[in-house]
Amino acid sequence: MLDHEYFMRKALEEAKMALEAGEVPVGAIVVAQGRIIARAYNRTQALNDVTAHAEMQAITSAAHYIGGKYLHQCTLYVTLEPCQMCAGALFWSQMSEVVYGASDPKRGYLALGTQIHPKTKVHSGVLADQCAALLDNFFKGKRRD
């Protein structure tokens, strides 16, 4: 079985695509039965849509792939701790597992007291340094502009 780091690296590839597109570099993938069924990255700028976070895009894509709205037996890998909005979508999709890299102490779902579905297993800190470095470098560049 492939491990969390393997799949987080795949989410990081998506985050790098977001960076190349001028988006906040957050990437996400959804895995079912050891296979990637959805890939996504932030597209808020391209779509002019504040809800176009990587997680939201990945949830929608995975639901289309499965043909249903509930993502039981699926795992979301995302490079940044989900925000309150994405945590709500994860709650309603009943994602079985969420694995994230970097924490977001200001806007993450934990800081804001939002809950993910009680049956969802959460793992944090997977490749956290790499995930955080990508975001830190992006925002340092924005502050220089």
Image (spheres, rainbow, N blue to C red):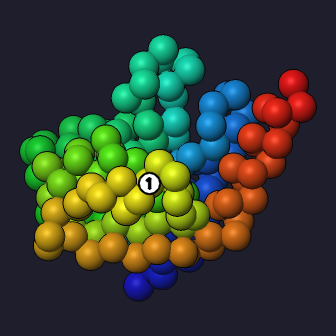
Element class at badge 1: loop
Residue at 67% across / 60% down in the picture?
132
Question: In the displayed structure, does residue 14 sit left or right of residue 108?
Answer: right
Q: Is residue 82 above or below residue 19?
A: below
Residue at 40% across / 76% down in the picture?
123
Task: Give the quadrant of the N terminus.
Answer: bottom left
At label 1, the amino acid type is: Gly
Residue 81 seen in render: yes
* Residue nearer the viewer, 2 or 132: 132
Q: Write down the residue under mark 1.
A: 108
Question: In the displayed structure, does residue 141 sit left or right of residue 4?
Answer: right
* Residue nearer the viewer, 52 or 35: 52
Residue at 42% across / 19% down in the picture?
49
Q: Spot the residue most to the right.
A: 144
* Quarter holding residue 10: bottom right
x, y percentage for residue 43?
51, 28
Question: In the displayed structure, does residue 50 sit left or right of residue 63?
Answer: right
Residue 32 seen in render: no
Task: Give the quadrant of the C terminus.
Answer: top right
* Residue nearer the viewer, 16 or 24: 24
x, y percentage for residue 77?
43, 62
x, y percentage for residue 124?
46, 74
Residue at 70% across / 28% down in the picture?
22
x, y percentage for residue 54?
45, 42
